[in-house]
Image: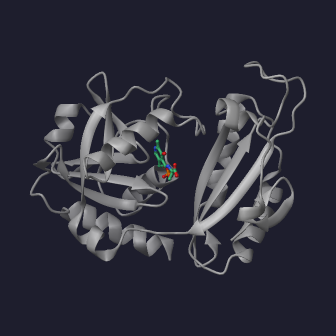
Amino acid sequence: MIAYLNGSFAPLAQLQVPVLDRGFLFGDGVYEMIPVYARQPFRLAEHLRRLQHSLDAVRIANPHSEAEWTAIVGELVAQQDFADQSIYLQVTRGAAYPRNHAFPADSTPTVFLFADPLTTPSATLLAQGVAAVTQADVRWLRCNIKAISLLANVLAKQHAVDEDVAETILIRDGLMIEGSASNIFVVRDGVILAPPPSHLMLTGITYDLIIELAQQHDMPLQACEISADELRAADEVWLTSSSKEVLAIVTLDGRPVGNGVPGPIYKAMYAHYAAFKT
Ligand code: PDD
């Protein structure tokens, strides 16, 4: 697998970063995960815009122009011997000595990208849906930054694995926020409900696309806060992300969601999503 580090392409296994990199020491960096279908990066401009937002938020100067990023991603995609890819892109504040929490006076950002085969949900998973559990959201108050410091998300996702389910849905102050690595939509009485973007959640590129698709296809959608009780009483619950696309959650904390099978609005939305990505 060919990867990219600071200007060069090389086999992933050969790449190394200094132990003093602030990504390693402090989790001081941001990232993107960009899906690639048939060698076409999906919604690249949107991912690069969110990358810019994350970099601005943590005050790392963007090391590349949009044209340069597009060229790097394009070259990385071309170098792989598989067509559907998951591109991981990370920028850290770079290496600095001595170790000090505050920004170093001069450090060069570390830019790292690699491609994995994209594994989207199987036909069985799409047809059957998945289970999820809920847990308190113990993350910080700037979850709209796609930061590499993901310890709380890691623990929340591991909770899902320990419970033998697909995702942990995070609840803060009685409100449903998002999944450990996904956004969550709810359907109630035929209306798709989306939690409004805020500093408490990462606004997914897929989340934005779902809203666009709902508008395009005249599907009623409302952005509004969703309580944990409303989540439990929902007719349908979906999770969305660049790798999971749109997936129905049919069991929540061991109880069925709606009828316990992927609902009609989910199926319609998935069909629109599948048609859009091709
Ligand atoms: N994560 N919220 C969180 C906390 C996420 O980690 C993700 C995606 C999303 C959905 O964002 P998008 O639709 O842009 O993928 C929401 C990616 C897939 C990851 O961490 O690998």
Which quadrant holds the N terminus? bottom right
224 or 93, nearer to the observer? 93
Query: Residue 54: image x %, image y %?
Result: 65, 37
Residue occupying the point 61% across, 50% down: 32
- Residue 63: percent from left, percent from top: 83, 44
Q: Is residue 81 visible?
A: yes
Q: Is residue 85 left or right of residue 61?
A: left
Residue at (25% x, 48% y) in the render: 132
Examine the rendering and report whether any part of residue 179 can be seen: no
Residue 36 horizontal side relative to residue 64, left or right: left
> Relative to residue 245, is residue 82 drawn left or right?
right
Q: Position of residue 47 (x, y in %)?
A: 62, 52
Residue at 34% of width from left, 46% of height from top? 184
Give the quadrant of residue 9.
bottom right
Closer to us: 171 or 168: 168
Rendered position, 116 above or below 234: below
The figure's colour scheme reads one colour
* Residue 25 x, y percent position in the rendering: 69, 31
Residue ID at (47%, 56%): 209
Q: Does residue 145 appear to the left or right of 199 in the view shown? A: right
Q: How many marks?
A: 0
Q: Quadrant of residue 60?
A: top right
Q: Residue furthest right?
A: 106
Residue 245, quarter of picture = bottom left
